[in-house]
Image: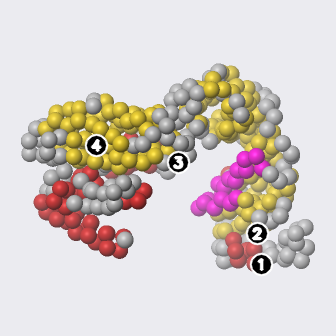
Amino acid sequence: GTSMSSPHVAGLGALLTDLHPDWSPMMIKSALMTTGYDLLSGADPFAQGAGHVDPNSAADPGLVYDHGFTDWLGFLCGTGQLQDWYCPALSIDPSDLNLASVSIGALAGAQTVTRTVTSVSDSTESYAFSANVPGIEVVADPASFTIAPGQSVSFSLTFTNVSAPVDTYATGFVYWTSASHTVRSPALVRPIYFDAPGEVSGSGTDGDTSFDVSFGYSGAYSAAAHGLEPATMTDGNVGDDPANSINAALDSCDFSDFPNSVFGCTGLTFHDVIVPAGTALTRMSLFDDYTDGNDDLDLYVWNSGWSQVGGSGSGTSAEQVDLVLPADTLYHVGVHGWQTDGADSNYTLFSWSVSATPGGNMSVDSAPASATLGATEAVDISWAGAAAGTKHLGAVSHSDGGGLIDLTAVSVDTD
């Protein structure tokens, strides 16, 4: 387990640092990973990671994958965890971080990743590529190379789903092999049926935007526009919760009229949101600009039977809960005064319900006429006549021959 593997690997890292003082921490990690061996015959990366460390082999791995601080910034930008000014220049696809492993969490047909290896050998070597990821074809470009000591070579790996089931990880290894070294990297790939962004945004009473969709199948495809819907804006007030605990706030409530109503809570205010039948997407939101101070409010949603179906708690009052194809027509929305900047906070609760029936002031201007396995194509949308001074929500539905396969939310601000 980790209690013993951690000190063993830390000790091996110290020994490799002593042996190769010019190696970076990531080079040492790479050497330990690419020279590992299977714990059990046929063990996959989910069972063993890169395998059992082999310190003598790690001392002479042949090739290493290296990266540094700037690469990690690009990775964090690519995952959306950072939104800083430098992200447009640094952002990378998360699967392109130069790790000694490959992970693709959403493979829609095919995807190409890039890697760079550096020779730490003391002689020039020629390497050839091979792979074993059941159900997935892996093609390297170049498929072989000759590399001198200290030299670096970049290559691409294209993963294509041939027969692996969707929504299940296909696991295996990719190899670079020379006469003296075998450099093995674990590979994990999850094929999916279809990939589209969860949300796109715009602004203005009239406007347009575009986004890409990728296909993990060939066949029927259509896109349709729903909305835009202006927000229902409900003003409210919530007191500060001295315990900073949603459970404590709930314990303070008066349940004498439950399940008809819950009232008298400390630091928790309830609103009922009615959702029309035939709704595709319901959203409840709070915004920092719509509170009266520097408040930290949280948002919780229960269905009509008081089972919690969503929650959002960040370090600010920017909170959002989405319900796709909501099953109920009544939802109880709780605004929690986690920490107000005074005794209470005035806020505005925003809610939208987007119909599952296409229509409204938004249109799909162009979209693929059909799906092609491995293809990525654009969907262009536009809107006109959105009411000024509020926030709007719509959706683009994606369907195949069997019905709805995905929704892309469209948020448009005119406030």
Residue linked to disc 2 = 268
Expressed as whole percent of the image width and height from the top left, the position of residue 137 reads 41, 35
Q: CA distance from mark 3 to mark 1?
A: 44 Å
Q: Residue at x 75, y 78 (%)?
A: 251
Marks 3 and 2 in Cβ contact (< 8 Å): no
Residue linked to disc 1 = 252
Amino acid on which disc 2 is placed: Leu
Q: Which residues are magenta?
A: 310-326
Residue 68 appears left or right of 372: left
Which of the two labelled residues, at mark 4 and mark 2, occupies the earlier sequence position?
A: 4
For label 2, the crowd category at 10 Å Cα-Cα, with few meaning under 14, some 14 to 19 and many 20 or more, is many
Could you tell me which secondary element the residue under label 4 belongs to?
strand
Colour logic: secondary structure
- 319 in the magenta segment: yes
Quarter holding the N terminus is: bottom left
Marks 3 and 1 in Cβ contact (< 8 Å): no
